[in-house]
Amino acid sequence: MKRRTLLASAAAVALAFSGTAMAEDKTKVGFVFVGPVGDGGWTTEHNNGRLAVEEAFGDKVETVFQEKVPEGADSERVMTQMALSGADLIFTTSFGYMDPTINVAKKFPDVKFEHATGYRQSENVSSYSARFYEGRAVIGHIAGKMTKTNKVGYIASFPIPEVIRGINSAYLHAKRVNPDVEFSVVWVYTWEDAAKEADAAEALINQGADILMQHTDTTAPMLKAEEAGILAFGQASDMIAAGPNAQLTSIIDDWAPYYIERTQAVMDGTWGSQNTWHGIKEGMVAFADMSDKIPTDVRAEALQMIEDLKDGSYHAFTGPINKQDGSAWLAEGETADDGTLAGMSFYVEGITGDIPN
């Protein structure tokens, strides 16, 4: 009897040890989200990337996430907790997480960190972003061709280079096909606040905008466009559910392939710090289906621009382009270099208003 008890105990210990070993063999991947996973925009698409990691690797990975994490000290706390809980790789998915990511990474040199849309790296911190401005070139072209009031409203989050690039790109391509087009920009100083985004959308509609663009995360502007009977472009995810009659297309940020690739690198032991900036060519910038409201010729032009951006035969910032003050920036046929684009802090000629400090 005692021998049986001893054998049973040994088996239980072996089984427990085996289970622990299996758990330890899993690669644990954490995600820090600035908005809710159901925002229908930015965070939804990052969470889709997380789910793609689970699907790609099955029981070889464990993913964890924290949503609605404010940028700043709160994000450091969340990252620290993830690292302490055994995360091997942590993706921090908002610009304002950049310095907190660097700070926490110093304390956990064996953990790999990936920060979205920032520019700082270290031995165990990579940065990654999408060339959103390529997508905005395409929707700018469509907007310029389709606006009837010649007024396009743009809801902007924070005055950082990423957002300024997008405004400039959309405006340039609208202006090239419609010299009479005007852009009105409303800064809301938030990534994700449905009430503020809705108020901004309503203000722009009241000013005569018949097409809305946004660089914010929720579907509130699309809902307002649907309600007002005007047109709009979705941001980060396909927002057709919020605006079945309003949406012309959405720029989709497809993070899944990158998340799978970087998780695999951690598993293989080949992960290294890098700075990634992918666009249409690599599939990180994609588009939702184009609405039947877009005229056939305009759709064909937009699709051709996508192909040209994809194969590199066209660059979204190709001169001649002047700065807002009229000074020359790019000469005829000259294209902007990545360094200038990464630090863009000026409007191009024709946009009215000032960039806030």
Image (cartoon, rainbow, N blue to C red):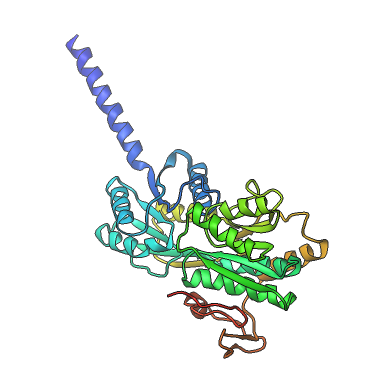
Query: Is residue 137 rendered to the left or right of residue 76?
Result: right
- Say which of 184 and 40 sits in front: 184
The image shows residue 341 at horizontal and vertical percentages of: 52, 77
- Residue at image position (64%, 46%) is 241
**328 over 128 or under it: above or below:** below
The image quarter containing residue 349 is bottom right
Q: State the residue lying farthest toward the right.
A: 296
Query: Is residue 123 rendered to the left or right of residue 38?
Result: left
Figure quadrant of the N terminus: top left
Query: Is residue 243 rendered to the left or right of residue 71?
Result: right
- Say which of 152 and 143 sits in front: 152
**In this figure, what is the number of numbered marks?**
0
- Residue at image position (61%, 63%) is 204
Residue 181 showing in the rendered view? yes
The image quarter containing residue 308 is bottom right
Figure quadrant of the C terminus: bottom left
The image shows residue 187 at horizontal and vertical percentages of: 50, 66
Query: Is residue 342 rendered to the left or right of residue 32?
Result: right
Q: State the residue lying farthest toward the left.
A: 2
Residue 284 showing in the rendered view? no
- Residue at image position (40%, 46%) is 65
Q: State the residue lying farthest toward the front.
A: 206
The image shows residue 47 at horizontal and vertical percentages of: 49, 48
**16 over 80 or under it: above or below:** above
The image shows residue 124 at horizontal and vertical percentages of: 34, 62
- Say which of 156 and 100 sits in front: 156
